[in-house]
Image: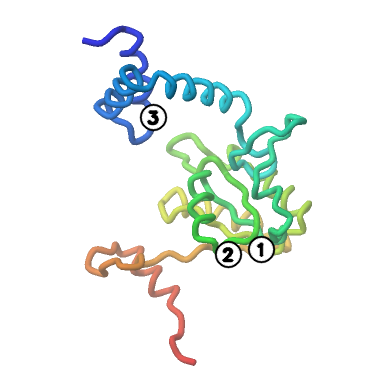
Amino acid sequence: MFPERLSRLMQLFARLPGVGEKTAQRYCLYLATEGGELSRQLGEELLAAASSVGPCQRCGNLAEADGEGQLVCAVCRDHRRDPSLLCVVARVQDLLAIERSGAMRGRYLVLGRLLSPLDGIGPEKLPLPALLQRIAEDGVREVIVATPPSVDGEATALLLARELSAVSVRVSRIASGVPHGGDLEFADQITLGRALDGRRSMGS
């Protein structure tokens, strides 16, 4: 039904997260019929990004190479950040979500994966040496573990707490509970338990 090259492009688009077959087809048909200039710009930016964007060499966040080829993200370059406060997240997407909240004024370390023995991901595949190095170099006083409240996320949090027990640093875990606007009727047992454990006084 479609030219072979266009079909291959659709297959590539369909491999992107959240893009199904119909969405990929819609994108490609638009680019082929309406977006000559857009297609050219998109191609140029994709090539440029592939060659100059990568993980920050300090924290794992996305960064663009500078004139010397160094990959250091905007968060790590921000001298207003508190280097003694380090937030450990599983993915770049989690880092971005926390940044949008505006509540984190420290710095980050992206693990890139979670502990998952069933998937062959053991402690040796987590960047624990990099974490210990950051703690020593930056004089970190508190490590905030912001892994997701899943089985793998909890296992990773417990591993980090154990590994850091010998280091003079406070290890804290982000609270989890009923989301704002949520209904208790539909909350699972773990979420409700966390919400009760993390309760705060309403008195003066």
- For mark 2, what is the residue? 172
Number of marks in the rendered image: 3
- For mark 1, what is the residue? 142
Name the residue: 54% across, 40% down: 112
- Locate residue 181, reporting x and y percent: 31, 67
- Locate residue 113, reporting x and y percent: 52, 41
Among the two numbered marks 2 and 3 on one chain, the one whose residue lies closer to the N terminus: 3
State the SS at label 1: strand
Using residue 45 as the reference point, say whether residue 13 is left or right of it. Answer: left
Mark 1 burial class by Cα count in 10 Å: few <14, some 14-19, many 20+: some
Instruction: Residue type at mark 3: give it.
Output: Leu
Quadrant (top left, top right, bottom left, bottom right) of the N terminus: top left
Using residue 147 as the reference point, say whether residue 63 is left or right of it. Answer: right
Instruction: Residue type at mark 1: give it.
Output: Glu
Name the residue: 69% across, 36% down: 71
Name the residue: 71% across, 59% down: 80
Closer-to-camera residue (85/52): 52
Mark 2 burial class by Cα count in 10 Å: few <14, some 14-19, many 20+: some
Among the two numbered marks 2 and 1 on one chain, the one whose residue lies closer to the N terminus: 1
State the SS at label 2: strand
Q: Nearer the viewer, mark 2 or mark 3?
A: 3
Instruction: Residue type at mark 2: give it.
Output: Ser
Among the two numbered marks 3 and 1 on one chain, the one whose residue lies closer to the N terminus: 3
The answer to the question of whether label 2 and label 1 lie on touching residues, with beta carbons closer than 8 A, is yes
Name the residue: 33% across, 17% down: 32
Q: Could you give the CA–CA distance between mark 2 and mark 3, rounded to whole angstroms? A: 34 Å
Q: Nearer the viewer, mark 3 or mark 1?
A: 3
- For mark 3, what is the residue? 16
- Locate residue 75, reporting x and y percent: 65, 50
- Locate residue 101, reporting x and y percent: 50, 60
